[in-house]
Each structure stands twice: as C-alpha cells, then as structure tokens.
Image (cartoon, helix red, strand yellow):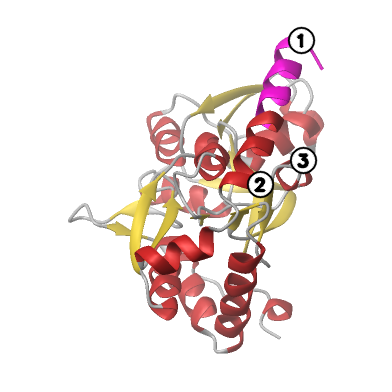
Amino acid sequence: MNRRMFVAAAGFALLAAAAVPALADSLDAIKASKTLRIALDLGSPPFGMNDASMQPTGSDVESAKLLAADLGYTLDLVQVTSPNRVPFLLTGKTDLVMASFSISEERKKVIDFSDPYGVIQIVIAAPKSVTIKDLKDVVGKRLGTTRGSTNDKEVTAQAQGAEMVRYDDDATLITALISGQVNIMASSPQTMASVNARRPNDPLEVKLVVKTNPYAIGIRKGDDALRAVVNEWVHANLRNGKLDAIYKKYNGVGLPAEMLN
C-alpha cells in the first residue's frame, strides 16, 4: 500500500470510528421524524435512474419506496454515486443505502449490511468482434468501469495489466460505451442491457463472469435496532414475493430460488 492509499484508508477508518457513537440511535431519530432517508444512485440503471418524466425509478427505488411504506415513514430520497455511498452513510447524511450495494469484506470493516435482497454479477463484456476467453486477453486493453464500485475493485485486482478507464457513475459509463470512448466494459449484465438498447448495430455480449455478488442495504455500525427491523422486512418481502417481483420487473429475470426460501 503506498503512502497516499495508507493515509486515505486511515482517514476513512477514523471517520467511521467517529461517526458510529454519535449516530448510533438512528431508529429513534427515524421514529421521531417519521422520515426514512435512503441513499439511492440514480445513475445506475436498472437499479436507479430517472424515467421520461425525470422521476426516480428502478428496482432499488421501488424497493426503497416499499420499505418506507411498510414501516410507515415518509421516504426522503438522498441521491448518491458509487464513490460516496459509504461517506454519506458514515457522516449521517442518510440512514440507509439502497444502491446495488454489493457486500464486500472491505466495506464490512466500516459499515454493516442487511441480509441480501438481490444479486448482481460482475462481467466483462465486449462486441462479438472482440475475442476475450480469459483474463489474459484483456491485458493492454481499455476497460470501462464505474469508479469505486465492486466491479472496479474486483476486475482491477484480477485483470492485472488491463487499462481501467473509470467513470463517476453507470450512466456516464453507458454513454461512453455507446459513443465508442471505450469498447469493453467491466460492469453488470444490467449495464450491458442499457448499452445494447442504444447500440443495436454492435451490441456487447458477456465474455467472462468474474464474480456473482449479493447486494444488501448499507447500515452504520452500531445501528443494530435499525438493522434488525430492516432484516425482518427483507425476509418478509422475499417470502411474500414482492422483492422478487420488483427485481424481475427491472432485470428481466427473477431472484435465485435459494434467496426466496
């Protein structure tokens, strides 16, 4: 770890340690305000995006609305991007994060997660004309990805020698792939589908599945009461099929059967 990375990591850890005691009673504050602040990434279709009327939509948006309604609170949608999901949570700008938030050991060091309510694959995709059979085939190639995402971190770690071209959100990455700024992506099948809808003459196809990650709701460490309430909601809505229906509506496929039991 170089000095800059060490200093950043140390600062991040201190921020986490300072934030938790002061914000540990989030559930009481939510009950008092009757408002649930949920961070959502509207630049990450089909999880979060704006519709033709510029209204928030997507599977995470609909899930967040369901969560707030089931708990009887007003939803306060806090817009985030991949890089600032954790900082917004740690500094108290939001109570929860629902933004295709993949569970990772690195993130678990500073925040907690609910039980999973969805899954997302990390894939490398490119046009049919590009041959990629394994990670060795991306050495020296430019791969577009979303900065700070698990896609970025996982592929950067595994695809040594590839040139990672990082964009601030999925929407910007999609635009870059449509315009030809980059021609290979390290992202999700959902991002690929969004690209192909606007790139029909030269669509991308999945070349490699790098990893399949469950995603969950991000919660501050110490917010155990809030986490218990959220977990109860997750399991109830997996059993009754509502979360599966939302996922299927926006992703085209249902959740894995083992998640619904």
Please state which amino acid type lies under the numbered disc 3: Lys
Compared with 45, 171 (above or below) is above
Label 2 – label 3 distance at C-alpha = 12 Å
Is residue 226 or residue 256 the one in the foreground? 226
Label 1 – label 2 distance at C-alpha = 31 Å
Image location of residue 130, percent across then percent down: 62, 34
Residue at 42% x, 50% y is: 194
Image location of residue 198, percent across then percent down: 35, 46
Label number found at residue 95 = none
Please state which amino acid type lies under the numbered disc 1: Arg
For marks 1 and 2, give the one nearer the viewer.
Answer: 1
Q: Which residue is mark 1?
A: 3
Q: Secondary structure at mark 1?
A: helix
Label number found at residue 133 = 3
Residue at 55% x, 89% y is: 240
Label 3 – label 1 distance at C-alpha = 36 Å
For marks 2 and 3, give the one nearer the viewer.
Answer: 2
